[in-house]
Each structure stands twice: as structure tokens, then as C-alpha cells.
Amino acid sequence: MEVRKKKRLKTTHFRRDFNQWSLLTAALGFAIAIPLFAIILNLFGGTGEMWDHIVSHFLTDYILNSIYLIIGTGTITCLIGTYCAWLVSRYQFPGHRLIEWLLFLPLAIPSYILAYTYVGMLGNGGTLIVLLRSIGLDIQRIEMMNIYGLIWVLSMSLFPYVYASARAMFQSQPQVLRDAAMLLGASERRYFFTVALPLALPAVIGGLFLVLMEVLNDYGAAKYYGINTFTTGIFRSWTALEDLQSAIYLSGMLTVLVFLLMALVKLQRGKKSFSIRIKQPDSATNRKIQVSGSRKVINLGILSVPVLFGFLLPLLQLLYWAVLTFNDIFRPDFFWMAIQSFGIASLSAVLVVIFSLLLIYFNKWNHLRGVAFFPKIATVGYVIPGAIIGIGIISSSQLVIDFFYDLLQIKIGYLFYGSSVILIYAYIFRFLAVAYNPLEANSLKIGKDLAESSYLLGHSNLKTLLKVELPLLKPTALSAMILVFIDTMKELPLTLILKPYQVQTLAVKAYEYAEDERVAEAALPALLLILVVASLLLFVNNLHNKTRAKKNPAELVEH
């Protein structure tokens, strides 16, 4: 009897809570996450024809190299990012604002482009090698095309993820914590290791997680350096071995690794949730220590190393190559390629923000708890490497094409393989979390009062969103749109798999030139990509600084 009552109660609750927003939330979330479901379903289809060959000759390399890259890159990015964040947040010295800004810019150079420039600088006859030999150093070359070189390249490209998150946390720590530590006789070093760093650790781990996801997503640098990883293996299985099922199996293994890393991050954080909210004057917040003399020189020297090797030297090398190849590359088709890149990235960014808002508010207007699963699964794409998403879309696209043809006699094959529609769809799934997370957080800050007042005045959910809540979310939406644009411009594996033959992007063109041993010719499209990304990164950084400057209370929150 009790079982029947519980079933009746659940049925009653379902009928009461179900509405059109429940259906729209589930449908939209499921439609966006189709690539992930396709990978999971295809894992039950058995191994591919070349699977035994892959296991015998490549699988061990895929696993070990991926682990080495995770450990090596994770360690270096944590050390560089955290220490640089501490120096710029704690100390003041001439040029500290410029250095603080420059430390973001290595993110503007995709890792595969950085890989090419390092070979050009340090290989036989490389620019830096010639310079070192001119001052009397007998160095023929520095070998970069190995796993150690790849770790260095990825670290120089990705440390700003840790730097940005750690810097934000260090800057938000109230000055009274430092004052209390001084009263207790703690040195600056002891304060860092016992107070500042433990409080900033969740932010450091969050930045590290993004680094590791980018390491697993990397294809261009690993392929160019000849390092076998899961991503290069997925491409090899699908293209060279022509075995899609084996590529799906490798994608499944990589997905397990990704979720294992997510579990480790959650385990590290545990169930800790504490906050320190201290009201104090702005002038008392985060006072920086003025340094001079040898300490100033040491700080500048430490902070200059990642800027020099992560941005300035590669940029100079690219500029040198661009001058040499300018007349050959700067032609009308270059402009058309740039327009295609900007157009696809812009449309993808706008659609990502729109779908994020729809998922957030459909789910907010829905009253069924179980439906909240669909927005979560739709935003998991950011932690899944692009190669996996591409394989998932390819494996599911034929089913959709056949469905439309068998049911409606409509041929949509060209829509999938002859246009950029499927590529943009892939970008939406890949980068939805970039817009969804900040928009959701800021929508919660708005609260319910304004929306409920609008409802009392007779406005519908959609009208309230458009007239009341969306204007308040406009700065966050703009920032999210720019970040998605940047990620889309830089994305390589997903674009290589899904772009139509006639479509060309700056990232793919730079990769193709380097693959054809025309590294110098890759400089001009790479420089344009870097210029656009760097400009937008600075715009977003300034936007965040202005927003933070308007906030009066000093708050530190750890979750």
C-alpha cells in the first residue's frame, strides 16, 4: 500500500510541476548534448577492426604521454601562475601594472603556434641560436621536438589560467588577515604558506583544471612534435586507419580520464564551504608592499621570464617571419579567410549566449527537479576535448540525416557536410559552459524580487526576461560573448574535423602551413589571430576591473 501511495504522490507532483518550460529545458539540453550521448551509445557497438593494432602499438604511448603531459604541465603552470599572481597582488614596484597586464597575453598565442615558433627559434639556424652564437656561446641547437619541449610549450601557453584565478583570489583577501598575521609575528613567507595560499587553493585548483583540459584537448602542438596522445590517436584512427569505431573507443577512454580529473578536483575541495566577509574601507583593502633595490630587480626578473618566453620572444619570431613572407601571403584570399573566421566565431558566440540564457531561464521557470539534469549535461562540453565532440557528431549525424530522409523525404546531407552549420553546432556544445556559468551566477545575484514585481504587473516570463533581467545581464553577456569568440577563434581539433572543405579559418591555415613545413608562411594568419585575441582579452580584463572597482566591500568567499 505504501509503495502505491508513493507512486501516486510522485505522479501527482509530476502533473502539478510539469509545464511547457520543463519540456523546453529537457529538449534543448538533450539536443545540445547529442554528441556525448552518441559517444556513450557507440561504445556498445564493439571494437573497431584496427583496435588490436592500436592496443599493441600505440595505446601505451597514448596513456603514458598523456599522464606525463598532465603532471609536467600541471606542475609548471601551478608554480609559475601562483607565484606570479602572488607577486603582482602583494607587491608594488615600477612597471607592476604593465607586467600584471602582460602576464595574461600568453593566452593569446595558441599552443600549436607557440610550438612552431620555438622550433624556429631554437632549431638548427634558429633565431635565438644565431644570437647566442654571435655572443660566443657554442650552441648548435636546443632540441624541442620531444615530450619535454611539449611540456614547456604547453606550460608557457597555459599558465595564465592559473595566474588569472589565483590573482583574483589573492586580490580579494582582506588586508586585516595580513595585519593579524603580522601582530602574531608571522613573516611574509609564513603568511603566504599558512594563510594566503590555503585560502587561494580552490582558485588555483580551478585554474589547474582548465589547464589540464587544454592539455588533453591539444592536437596541433603534439602532432607537430610527434608525441602520441589520445587526441592525436583519435585523429589517426579516424583518418589514417579509417576506423571510426576505434576512434570512438579512444574517445571513451579519454572521456573517462577527464571525468576522473573532475572527481579528483571535487575530492580535493571536499565539502568545505566557508566565507569571510569583512566590511572595511577600500583604502584598507589589499594594500601592496612597496619594494625597491634588489627586491625590485628580483621581482621584475621573475615576472619577466614567463612574459618573455610565453609571449614576447614568440611574437618577435612571428613578426620576423611575417616580414619575410608578407608579399606571398597578404592576398585577397587572406582577407576572405579572416572574414570567414570572424563570421563563424561571431555567430557561434551570439548563439552560445542565446542558448545559455534560454537554458538558464527555461530551467528557472520549470518546477520539476529532475529536469535540472539537462542543463548540466549540456554544459559538460567544455571539459570534453574537441576531438571527442567531433567524433560524437560524426557518429550521430548519419542517423539524423537518415531520419529526415526516411520520415520526411528531406535530404539534409549538405547541411551537415557542405556548410558550417554542424561546425557552429559543435562550438555551441563545446563552449556553452563559458557563457552559461557566469550568466547563471549573475542571474542568481539579481534575485527574485524584480521578476516577481514584473509578474504582479501582468508581464509574462519572456517579457520580464527581455525588459527587466536581460538589461541587467548585459555586461556579463558581452563578456561571455567575447570569451566564446576567443575560444572559437583558437579552436583547432574540432575545426579540423568538422569544417567544410571550402571553409578556411586562421587557426587551420596556420596549422596547415606548419604541417607542410612552411612555418614562416604560418606567421601572418597566426599574428592576426593573436592580435584579435589579445585585444579582446585586454577588453575583458578592463571590463572586469571596472566592475570590481564599483564594489565597496572586501569579500573573500571559498566554496
Image (cartoon, rainbow, N blue to C red):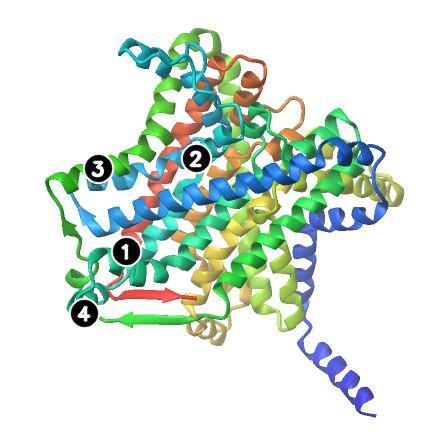
- The amino acid type, in three-letter code, at marker 4 is Leu
Q: Earlier in the sequence, mark 1 or mark 3?
A: 1
Q: CA distance from mark 2 to mark 4?
A: 40 Å
Which residue matches tag 4?
184
Would residue 548 be visible to someone looking at this image?
A: yes
Which residue occupies 77% across, 43% down?
Answer: 396
Q: Quadrant of the N terminus?
A: bottom right
Tag 3 residue: 300
**Residue bearing mark 2:** 157
* Mark 1 lies on residue: 171
* Amino acid, disc 1: Gln
Which of marks 2 and 1 precedes in the sequence? Answer: 2
Q: Cα distance, mark 1 to mark 2?
A: 23 Å
Horizontal and vertical percent position of residue 485: 48, 39
Position of residue 428 measured from the top left corner of the image (x, y, whole percent) = 59, 45
Quarter that holds the C terminus: bottom left
- Mark 1 vs mark 3: give the one in front: 3
